[in-house]
């Protein structure tokens, strides 16, 4: 899943020594334990409250697929700045 690779790059896993070599091992799309640190980093990285609002709204759904999608959108917007 290419979105998980994008998240892994955003989280800079290689520099932390936590690099997983197969993209299929990334579990951001199905594990809250994997996704919540990403959400936290988004809040620490972003500078647009509108983008944070989108993540918060997604969190209220308690649906990991929705939160994952919004986080990917956030990261893409951040990369395009």
Image (cartoon, rainbow, N blue to C red):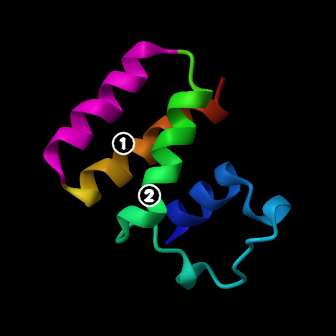
Report the side of 77 relative to 13 (left or right): left
At 44% from the left and 40% from the top, the residue drawn is: 73
Report the side of 52 relative to 21 (left or right): left
Q: Is residue 53 magenta?
A: yes
Task: Please say if 11 is above or below 5.
Answer: above
Mark 2 crowdedness (10 Å alpha carbons): few <14, some 14-19, many ≥20: some
**Is label 2 in a helix, a strand or a loop?**
helix
Task: Find the magenta span and give its range.
Answer: 48-62
At 65% from the left and 35% from the top, the residue drawn is: 79
**For residue 81, which numbered disc appears in the image?**
none
At 72% from the left and 83% from the top, the residue drawn is: 21
At 66% from the left and 52% from the top, the residue drawn is: 11
Mark 1 crowdedness (10 Å alpha carbons): few <14, some 14-19, many ≥20: many
The residue that label 1 is drawn on is 70
The residue that label 2 is drawn on is 35
Ranked by sequence position, the earlier of labels 2 and 1 is 2
Q: Main secondary structure of the magenta part?
A: helix
Report the side of 64 relative to 7 (left or right): left
Name the foreground residue: 81 vs 51.
51
**Is label 1 in a helix, a strand or a loop?**
helix
- Asked where in the image residue 55 lies, by quadrant, the reply is top left
Task: Please say if 21 is above or below 53.
Answer: below
Counting from the top left corner in percent of width and height, residue 56 is at 29, 32
- Asked where in the image residue 30 lies, by quadrant, the reply is bottom left
Quadrant of the frame with the C terminus:
top right
Name the foreground residue: 44 vs 75.
44
Q: Which one is closest to the eye, mark 2 or mark 1? A: 2
Counting from the top left corner in percent of width and height, residue 12 is at 74, 55
Task: Please say if 1 is above or below 63.
Answer: below
Q: Residue furthest left?
A: 61
């Amino acid at each position: 899943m290419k979105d998980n690779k994008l998240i892994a790059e955003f989280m800079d896993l290689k520099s932390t020594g936590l690099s997983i070599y197969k993209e299929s091992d990334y579990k951001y799309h199905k594990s809250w334990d994997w996704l919540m640190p990403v959400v936290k980093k988004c809040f620490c990285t972003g500078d647009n409250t509108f983008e944070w609002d989108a993540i918060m709204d997604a969190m209220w759904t308690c649906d990991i697929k929705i939160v994952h999608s919004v986080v990917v959108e956030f990261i893409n917007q951040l990369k395009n700045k």
